[in-house]
Image (cartoon, rainbow, N blue to C red):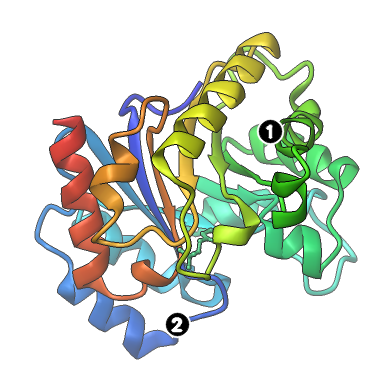
């Protein structure tokens, strides 16, 4: 259900980056930034999509957005439609990031509508799931992930999809899940996805950096990373890409 390359390293810039920073970033990427066996993608803010499209493509980097609205057009001030993202050159769209679930209050019902709208426009959603620290500590991780994945019930067989497991307590904190936690949780997610008929790629996200990328990418069931802070600089982003290339080569 995911793209043909099994490993994806995707940079989520969140609400960071203005034009000059983006141009400097692309200038700092190596010539072919997507090595064999690894696909590289960048999700800059909406404001940079149009400008970055051709520049990223020249470096072999696929582009995505960080959110989308589910209506195709009309009186929805401030919203961006799936076709608008396609028009800017996006292949991916991040959906259900914990910052949108927790800060903006996005819920499962809205997320399923967004998934369907993204698929209808030919976008590949990267659906983020993950538990809070209190949920991990109380042993509720699998139940939380199962309820977040439940929106994948009755997904069209040909739908493009990637899932990103991002434990909320590991996002932007410098803490990462241990290799044992990552392996065990990814195994649960893969089983659940198979049960739902969505056998897709599963990324890990949460404080991935050049020092821990090789270990995390080496965990069974991990097929890439969704990178926040370390994707803002070309040097650290490329170091993660190259660590993945080593693991998946
Ligand atoms: P950090 O890599 O900054 O922890 O962010 C992870 C993330 O939220 C990516 O979507």
206 shown above or below 221: below
Could you say whether the residue bearing mark 2 is in a helix, strand or loop?
Answer: loop
Left or right side of 98 for 3: left
Q: Quadrant of residue 98?
A: bottom right
Relative placement, left or right, of 8 versus 136 is left
Query: In whole angstroms, how far apart are the C-alphas of marks 1 and 2?
Result: 29 Å
Q: Nearer the viewer, residue 70 or 35?
A: 35
- The C terminus lies in quadrant: top left
Q: Mark 1 falls on what kind of element?
A: helix
16, above or below 72, in the image = below
Q: Is any part of residue 80 visible from this angle?
A: no
On the image, the x and y values in percent for residue 137 come to 72, 48
Residue that label 1 marks: 120
Q: 139 and 90: which one is in front?
A: 139
Residue 97 visible in the displayed image = yes
Say which residue label 2 marks: 17
Residue at image position (46%, 44%) is 204
Percent x, y for residue 86? 54, 50
- Give the camera-side residue of 144 and 79: 144
Specify which label sits upstream in the sequence, 1 or 2.
2
Is the residue at mark 2 in contact range of ligand 1, meaning its CB lies under 8 Å from it? Answer: no
- Where, by quadrant of the figure, is residue 161 drawn? top right
């Amino acid at each position: 259900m995911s793209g043909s390359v099994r490993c994806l390293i995707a940079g989520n810039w969140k609400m960071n980056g203005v034009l000059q920073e983006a141009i400097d970033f692309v200038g700092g990427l190596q010539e072919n930034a997507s090595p064999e066996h690894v696909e590289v993608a960048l999700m800059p803010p909406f404001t940079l999509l149009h400008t970055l499209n051709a520049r990223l493509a020249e470096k072999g980097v696929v582009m995505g957005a960080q959110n989308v609205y589910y209506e195709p057009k009309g009186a929805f001030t401030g919203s961006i439609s799936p076709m608008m993202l396609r028009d800017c050159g996006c292949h991916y769209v991040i959906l259900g990031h914990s910052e949108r679930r927790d800060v903006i209050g996005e819920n499962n019902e809205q997320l399923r509508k967004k998934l369907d709208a993204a698929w209808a426009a030919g976008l590949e959603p990267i659906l983020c799931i993950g538990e809070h620290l209190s949920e991990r500590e109380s042993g509720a991780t699998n139940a939380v992930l199962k309820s977040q994945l439940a929106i994948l019930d009755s997904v069209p067989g040909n739908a493009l999809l990637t899932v990103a497991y991002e434990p909320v307590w590991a996002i932007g904190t410098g803490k990462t899940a241990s290799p044992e936690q990552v392996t065990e949780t990814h195994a649960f997610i893969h089983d659940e996805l198979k049960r739902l008929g969505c056998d897709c790629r599963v990324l890990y996200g949460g404080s991935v950096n050049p020092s821990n990328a090789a270990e995390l990418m080496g965990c069974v069931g991990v097929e890439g990373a969704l990178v926040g802070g370390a994707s803002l600089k070309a040097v650290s982003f490329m170091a993660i890409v190259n660590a993945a290339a080593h693991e998946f080569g």
